[in-house]
Structures are given as structure tokens and as C-alpha cells.
């Protein structure tokens, strides 16, 4: 009854490709974030991570 136009098929293919690339990028950023948080946790034991900046010249613990 209804035939899909070739333009719609090509557009769908491009959208799927872009969606896959976007998903891979999000997974990469998430993975890097997890690794970075894990490294901070191993180094500090999640103690002393307050989110405040240490200015140059200030003493650290």
C-alpha cells in the first residue's frame, strides 16, 4: 500500500550511523569518568575530596 521513498531509507541509515557514533562517544566519556573517579578513590580513599580548589601557596593536609 505505502512504499517508502529511497530518500527516507538513506536518511534513516545516516541517522542510525550518527546515533551509533554518538552512543560510542557517550560511552567513551562515561568510561573515562569512571576511570578518573576510581583513580581519585584509590589515591585519597575518597577522604579529603571536597570539591574546593587549593590555591597556590596554601598548605595541604
Image (spheres, rainbow, N blue to C red):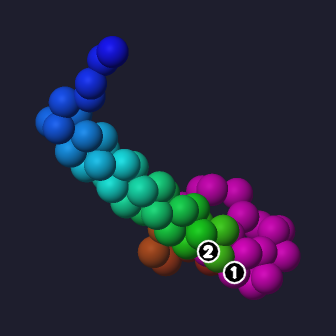
Asked if residue 8 can be seen in this view, the reply is yes
Reply yes or no: does residue 49 show up in magenta. Answer: yes
27 lies above or below 61? above
Please name whichever residue, 60 or 36, is drawn nearer the observer in this view of the structure.
36
Furthest residue toward front:
1
> Badge 1 local density, few (<14 within 10 Å), some, or many (20+)?
few
Q: Residue 1 sits in which quadrant?
A: top left
- Compared to 13, does 33 lie above or below? below
Query: Residue 37 vs residue 21: left or right?
Result: right
Which numbered marker is on residue 30? none
Indicate the position of residue 31 as horizontal and vertical percent values. 59, 69
Question: Can you say which quadrant of the picture contains the C terminus?
Answer: bottom right
For the residues bearing labels 2 and 1, Cβ distance under 8 angstroms: yes
Q: Residue at x 70, y 57 (%)?
A: 50
The residues tagged by marks 2 and 1 sit, at their Cα atoms, a distance apart of 5 Å
In this image, 4 relative to 22: left or right? Answer: left
Q: Position of residue 48 (x, y in %)?
A: 77, 67
What element does badge 1 sit on? Answer: helix
Magenta span covers which residues?
36-54
Residue 54 image offset from top left, x and y in percent: 55, 67
What residue is disc 2 on?
A: 36
Residue sitting farthest toward the top? 1
Q: Is residue 1 left or right of residue 52?
A: left
Q: Secondary structure at mark 2?
A: helix
Amino acid at each position: 500500500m505505502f512504499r517508502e521513498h529511497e530518500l527516507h531509507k538513506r536518511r534513516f541509515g545516516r541517522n542510525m550511523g550518527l546515533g551509533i557514533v554518538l552512543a560510542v562517544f557517550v560511552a567513551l566519556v562515561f568510561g573515562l569518568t569512571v576511570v578518573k573517579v576510581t583513580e581519585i578513590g584509590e589515591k585519597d580513599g575518597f577522604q579529603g575530596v571536597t570539591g574546593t580548589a587549593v590555591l597556590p601557596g596554601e598548605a595541604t593536609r
